[in-house]
Image (tube, rainbow, N blue to C red):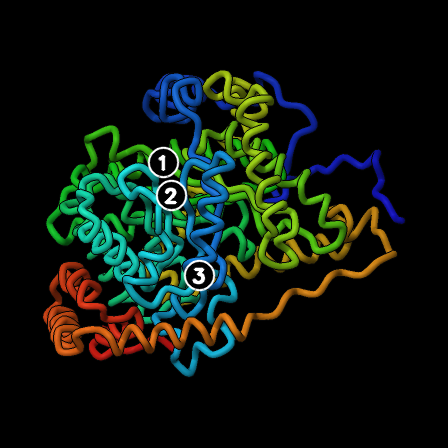
Amino acid sequence: MAGVDEERAPGTSPSGLGLPPVVGPADVAAGLTAPERLGAPGEAPFTRGLHKTMYRGRLWTMRQYAGFGSARSTNERFRYLLGQGQTGLSVAFDLPTQMGLDSDAPRAQGEVGRVGVAIDSLEDMDDLLHGIPLDRVSISMTINATAPILLAMVVALADERGVARSELRGTVQNDILKEFAARGTYVYPPGPSLALATDVIAWAAQHVPRWNPISISGYHIREAGATAPQEIAFTLANGLAYVDSVRRRGLAMDAFGPRLSFFFAAHSDLFEEVAKFRAARRLWWELAGARGATDPRARMLRFHTQTAGSTLTAQQPEVNTVRVAIQALAAVMGGTQSLHTNAYDEALGLPTPESARLALRTQQVVAFESGAAATADPLGGSYYVEWLTDRLEREAREILAEVERVGGAVAAIESGYLQRQIEESAFRYQQDVESGGRPVVGVNCYVETAGTTPPVAPGDPEAEARQRAELIRRRAARDDARARRALADVTARSRAGDNVMDAIVEAVKARATLGEISDAMREVFGEQR
């Protein structure tokens, strides 16, 4: 069992930042602690957190991510987690749902329900949220290309249950730019995709005012291999692209800015991650102000955090519990508004109920036993944390300037610039791991040679067959003429360049399926290959 040289000073952060062996007053930049740079918790520029008392007033939302094959089985997991003390829902969808394909589409074969829940119709959404009060439980949906359709399903379901739209609370990820940059579940080309994301933001501001219509996601950018400064810069660059797109529709940033949300990863370097969150808040305050926001709420960077899936190891998976605990602590000490903690066995497959419960208990221990929630910004004023916050902000500014030089986020994605930067960072990090320069316990040091890694479970052909059969039955039972008229309206509004959200809501109510609605827009926008 090979270890590491315990006398060796690391010297650099995981993002490659050179670190001094000790930081003192002389190392903190002049003016860094001035009010306009640091301030107090709950005061601009919100470096130290969005609220004066932070978690003394209200804890973050504990929102465990889940999605299992069918809507009914996922509903069971949601109700189990709510019973265990979870305070918000977070929905994982299968790949066909993410890609705008019905479960009986040829391209969906073998993928139905494999990495999340399959949602084809409003009836599926009803099954997913059975027994869950829509006006009291916040619902987060990790969905992007088909975000307009999934949001429309929640709204249509609320209408049919008699729940006021103004009472709906939750988030739809709706961040299509990061799909082109780092993840790949896009459907339409970049231009129409950005227009659809903008439709959701503009429509939600009027119809579901308590809903977050976008979660601008650095998480997937970081998971693809970006460094912490790149995660800040590329995420905020994408955020500016959405802001500019909505402003071109004639909406002032104060009208929609308060409902913008962000999504970041929490990795295992406690101090780099805490400083990353603080730097991102301070930088967004400035960038939003430059885009015309005057309402302080429109300049606040509110964010959800997920512990880093890319840091989980199939080797010695129980060690992941330690990683997740450190990452959760970083998110809380960095001032997150909601948090998902990964289960230790997620490098092997979907989490078991037992591992999901332990992940939730990890958050509860941080909340009620660690002391991290007892005071706002507990690491604020640390010479090292303030130095690192300033360093990360400076690095992120330089990257943002380069993105602007190539024409902004959309142009950077279309040219491949952004993807190349992420790939190069991922390659450098992997080289460090393989050389042993970056220790990963259980992988390149303290390795256990005994035992084998359990195989990843295959899909469930029987569950997939049931989902397809139910979809066919529901199509046959609907008023098909009404569904066809609603789909034609989606196509017509897409062709006219109108906001399509009202048409999609009506199509959902007419029992048109997710794949049919996606096809109605594919007819106009085409499909990105």
Distance of label 2 from label 3 (alpha carbons): 23 Å
Q: In this rendered view, identify the residue nearer to me: 392 or 453.
A: 453
Count all numbered tags in the image, as a single digit.
3
Q: Please name the residue that numbered disc 1 is placed on.
A: 302
Classify mark 3: helix, strand or loop. Answer: loop
Tell me: 87 left or right of 6: left
First in sequence, mark 2 or 3: give its number: 3
Q: In this view, does 93 lie above or below 483?
A: above
Classify mark 1: helix, strand or loop. Answer: loop
Tell me: 408 left or right of 483: right
Q: Determine the image quadrant of residue 384.
A: top right
Residue type, label 1: Arg
- Can residue 304 be seen here? The reply is yes
Residue type, label 2: Phe
Residue shown at the point (22%, 52%) measured from the top left: 155
Q: Position of residue 202 (x, y in %)?
A: 18, 50
Residue shown at the point (48%, 34%) measured from the top left: 85
Q: Position of residue 147 (x, y in %)?
A: 31, 59
Residue shown at the point (40%, 76%) measured from the top left: 468
Residue shown at the point (73%, 47%) measured from the top left: 440
The circle drawn on residue 2 is none
Q: In this view, does 257 lie above or below 98?
A: above
The circle drawn on residue 117 is 3
First in sequence, mark 3 or 1: give its number: 3
**Crowding near pointer 1: few (<14 within 10 Å), some, many (20+)?**
many
The circle drawn on residue 262 is 2
Q: Position of residue 280 (x, y in %)?
A: 42, 37
Residue type, label 3: Val
Q: In this rendered view, identify the residue nearer to me: 234 or 349.
A: 349
Disc 1 + disc 2, Cβ < 8 Å:
yes
Q: Determine the image quadrant of residue 363.
A: top right
Report the quarter where the C terminus lies: bottom left
